[in-house]
Image (tube, helix red, strand yellow):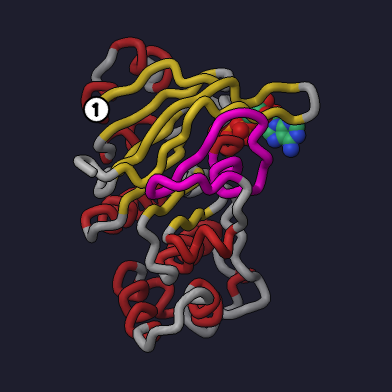
Amino acid sequence: MADNILLQVEGLKVAYGGIQAVKGVDFDVREGELVSLIGANGAGKTTTLKAVTGLQPVAVGDIKFLGRSIKGQGAWNLAKQGLVMVPEGRGTFTRMTITENLQMGAFIRKDNEIADDIEKVFGLFPRLKERRAQLAGTMSGGEQQMLAMGRALMARPKLLLLDEPSMGLSPIMVDKIFEVVNDIHQQGVTVLLVEQNASRALELATRGYVMESGAITMKGDGKALLNDPKVRAAYLGE
Ligand SMILES: Nc1ncnc2c1ncn2[C@@H]1O[C@H](COP(=O)(O)OP(=O)(O)OP(=O)(O)O)[C@@H](O)[C@H]1O
Ligand SMILES: [Mg+2]
């Protein structure tokens, strides 16, 4: 394959009862890219990610990972193939320690480099190392976001899906999270980043898509979208 498509979403439609939340969406993510999917509240971004990860049934369309349909597959199967999501709201195991959460992230692995990878996660997030024995449920929102990202990395994903990692965090923590998203991408992990923070997400993006009312309305290079007057007017308050 020329530009090695990891994820291909084709004609995706998703409904909640009678309400169409995603109305025929096409996009792809190629190996090595950081693709940002931006859009306002209720645009259908999370619903799209849930359809990709089998948490929400696909009404119409197909989802392919490395050329094969993954429609309806659950988290375990997807992780084994290298597709891992950090959900909106993080979903850490609150009654386990940080180290235990990271070990859980490696549940699909049988190699003997898990302890080494925990040290790599601690390298990305020194804060987690300081608190390695603390229960996840007692950590701040930003720390839980770091842990959720660290746990996902423990699966050694080929493609990491991040749903609004900066949501609800303080400005300093937002800076830290985007810095680490960039580091993760620079280290060779392909990333699909869903964000309402359009400027930060597009600054880092190889390519981007804009979603409105269940449809993709614009797409292009990250920088081109960032400088597009329509994007700036609608999403950057200009
Ligand atoms: N479980 C559900 N049942 C019914 N409707 C839902 C459900 N989840 C989402 N929706 C609706 O689907 C639409 C898309 O929601 P979705 O969560 O995908 O948006 P989003 O782009 O992720 O928004 P945000 O940026 O606020 O997270 C919204 O109108 C929402 O109300
Ligand atoms: Mg959402």
- Circle 1 — which element? strand
Task: Specify few, some or many for label 1: CA neighbours under 10 Å numbering under 14, 14-19, or 20 or more.
Answer: some
* Relative to 144, residue 169 above or below: above
Quarter of the image where the C terminus is located: top left
Residue 142 as seen in the image, left or right of residue 19: left
Q: Is residue 42 visible?
A: no
Q: For the residue marked with disc 1, what is the amino acid?
A: Asp
Q: Is residue 136 magenta?
A: no
Q: Which residue lies at the image location 50% right of the left edge and 45% below the top edge? A: 69
Q: Which residue lies at the image location 55% right of the left edge and 36% below the top edge? A: 48
Q: Is residue 97 visible?
A: yes
* Relative to 204, residue 179 above or below: below
Q: Is residue 58 magenta?
A: yes
Residue 97 as seen in the image, left or right of residue 230: right
Quarter of the image where the N terminus is located: top left
Residue 231 as seen in the image, left or right of residue 84: left
Which residue was labeled with disc 1? Answer: 221
Q: Position of residue 166 (x, y in %)?
A: 46, 46
Q: Which residue lies at the image location 55% right of the left edge and 57% below the top edge? A: 141
- Considering every residue shown, the one lying at the far right of the view is 17
- Which residues are drawn in magenta? 49-71
Q: Position of residue 108 (x, y in %)?
A: 50, 74
- Please tell me which residue lies in front, 68 or 182: 68
Residue 57 as seen in the image, left or right of residue 196: right
- Please tell me which residue lies in front, 146 or 46: 46
Q: Which residue lies at the image location 45% right of the left edge and 49% below the top edge? A: 161
